[in-house]
Image (cartoon, rainbow, N blue to C red):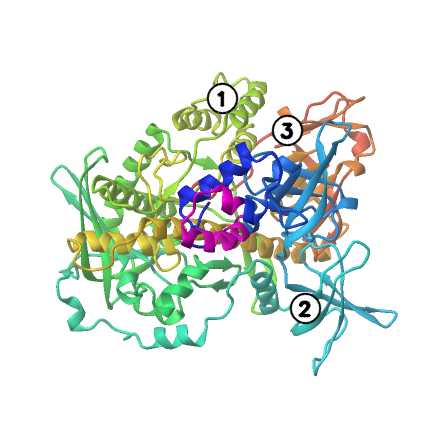
Amino acid sequence: MSLLPGDMSRFVLSEILDLLQKHARRPLSLREIQETLDLSAGERKALGRTMKSLVKEGSLVQLKGGRFALPKKVNLVVGRLSLHRDGYGFVSPADGGRDDLFIPARHIRPAMHGDLVVARLEHSNRSGRPEGRVIRVEQRAHRLVVGRYRVEHGVGFVLPVDPRIHDALLVSPGGDLEVGPEQMVLAEIESYPGRTRGAVGRIREVLGDATDPDVEIRIAAIQFNLPYEFPAAVLAEAGKVTPRVKKSELTGREDLRAINFVTIDGETARDFDDAVAIRRLEEGYRLTVAIADVAHYVAVGSEVDKEALARGTSVYFPGACLPMLPEALSNGICSLNPGVDRLVLAAELDFDARGRRTAVRFCEGVMRSRARLPYTEVADLLGEANAEVPAAIQDFVGDLEIMRELAELRIALRQQRGSLDFDLPETQIRLDLQGRTEDIVRMERNLAHRLIEDFMLAANEAVASWLVQLQQPMIFRVHEAPGEGKMADFQEFISHFNQGVSVPAAGVRPKILQELLERVAGRPEEYVINQVLLRSLPQAYYSTINIGHFGLAADDYCHFTSPIRRYPDLTVHRILKRQLSGGVHGKVVDAGYLEEIAGRSSSAERRAMEAERDIVNLKKCQYVADKVGEKYHGMVTSVHAFGMFVELREIFVEGLVHVSSLEDDFYQYEAERHRLIGMNRRCAFTIGTPVRVTVHKVDLDRREIDLRLVDQQQTSPGKNHSARGKPKQRRRATGARTR
């Protein structure tokens, strides 16, 4: 239980659950529970609120007559309903006591996607999988719905953009709103669906044309519950911050302005969290990483702080951003722009000649960036001995060469200890002046990217290790080891490639996996093994419990280097600043509050990723919409029972070849080998298989691209297609899933 309901202690809550689990032979009323437990007067008074809270979070279920029971005792499951676009759904038990319960489409109503529901376990289907029926909705997930307005036979309705919300919403424009067919609107549900009737509502706001880039972002913000505009109070508070560093703010700070700091970022970057400087020592290197001191300007509990916590992270879309902090801070006083004084938290890291960290020191300081250097120019300089040196970089050639030396040493050390380095392509969407997709290109990750990435990883590890030594409660960035089942499946998969590497199901170490990635580098199966391994790993998250970071092979790791765009980094800054001041400055951070921040930040990160993915998929669908009928070379990127996803190599867009369109044979899905195989001709499709496809159909609302194989009948029987070469311009991906 995350929060204590009412005024009850954890001990009393445990007693309530124990009573209903072990001693109650039937559901109990509130009065019976009060009489059975030895409660204080205050606890008896708070019991009602406590029971309601336990029901709300799914730990208990309230039956007819007001009696309470544990869900599993009465063959019920309480949890969130997740609907599939095809109609069926699953209920994830709130208490985690059993597997998700499958709900057939005919037994969903009156619930909607995301609702907290009570479902009854009814029977098992032919496959042995238990099935259930929704019997009651405890809490609605949606009050507002975004969708497309249509009129048929004089009746207006809204088709939700979220394909998991299946029912159209009957509406009337109401008021003075002017809305035309096919416009996007925000509608409020006034009457939720019943067993035999649909939902009814009203239009609250006309958003505009679905193809307007601003409308697209607004829709994503509403759909994924992202704050869109800053409240007036937040903007007013941020506007009061002095746009330049004052002399009074330098008291107690170390003057770092003589150090040769530079920022290295993308060409379109506008906010600069970090700057780096390097100096060769007699027996190694001194790297200084300066990070914007956002905590100096954003006080705990301020209006800006509360809004930053609610947002959790900046959300980046092609050509647009929903920032965590107002622009006056993110692009102004907190951004390490060249030629101006900026307040920072600095990490001074010493390394020996082999790249091993030997000393660390932190300080609050003031610095001045010498230059803003783009990734591409730095990469050209470091990658080509005879490259023409741009004027802006000429003064920093020597420092950049030393940075490269250190980065290469550090990267080699990380790989030796087992830090995973995936070889996967990524794409970049280029927009025209109207915000329409102009081109989609492979994004090349160069040496400059790798250099800055390694320096930030080094700073994050150093901060985490130092605070751990001080036994300071904090927020870690953690990554769990993969489960035994995932690794057993992965070992079964790679056994078909004869790599000579055995991956244990239990107790796998990252070094074994990294050795496998190095072994397959440059080979035809490289892409497929990288893909399957990444999908076998859990997602990293924030936690107050330090379990280490599996993907980085790090015992201690946190996020420290991006306080402008991530709230956990800002929190770590506050903890670090308090330690540097000997506890004089800053409030004592409560462990329970840190746990809440970690949970909310992890949820915010997942929301942001889903929203970013949705907009990227929309932009790709828009790009392909006028290419129906055109043929492309492609490569299978994932295989499922319903079909296979194929990336079009020429334009870097992914679509689905549904299994029903494979007309040359009956195809069976082999999960352990991630492939579809024909029962008669034995033609197989697995990750990495090269194919020739045509664009059959594009559905913008559902973000779907439907592909068809070209010349199926010419495929040779008995031929097992596999990867035959790696895509061009392959980048060295760090695995956003794990970092």
Q: Secondary structure at mark 3?
A: loop
Residue 727, magenta (yes or no): no
Residue plotted at (70% across, 32% down): 130
Query: Is residue 41 part of the magenta span, yes or no?
Result: yes
Of callouts 1 and 2, the N-terminal one: 2
- At which x and y percent is residue 563? 34, 57
Q: Which residues are magenta?
A: 33-54
Query: Label 1: how many residues lie within 10 Å, few (<14), some (14-19) or many (20+)?
Result: some
In this picture, residue 107 sits left or right of residue 389: right
Residue 107 point in image, percent of width and height: 76, 45
**As drawn, which residue projects farthest toward the bottom?**
176
Q: Name the amino acid, label 1.
A: Ala
Q: Are marks 3 and 2 in contact (CB under 8 Å)?
A: no
Which circle's residue, 3 or 2, is located before the other in the chain?
2
Query: Which of marks 1 and 3 precedes in the sequence?
Result: 1
Amino acid type for the residue under numbered disc 3: His
At mark 1, the secondary structure is loop
In the image, residue 666 sits, relative to residue 207, either above or below, namely above
Q: Within the image, what quadrant is residue 286 found in?
A: top left
Q: Residue at x 36, y 72 (%)?
A: 328
Tell me if mark 3 has few (under 14), some (14-19) or many (20+) residues whose alpha carbon lies within 10 angstroms of its own. Answer: many
Q: Can residue 690 be seen in this snapshot?
A: yes
Question: At 32% across and 48% down in the image, what residue appears?
Answer: 591
Read off the residue under disc 2.
187
Q: Which residue is more in the foreground, 71 or 501?
A: 71
> Label 1: which residue?
505
Residue 481 sits above or below residue 377 on the image: above
Which residue position is annotated with label 3? 674
Residue type at the position of mark 2: Ala
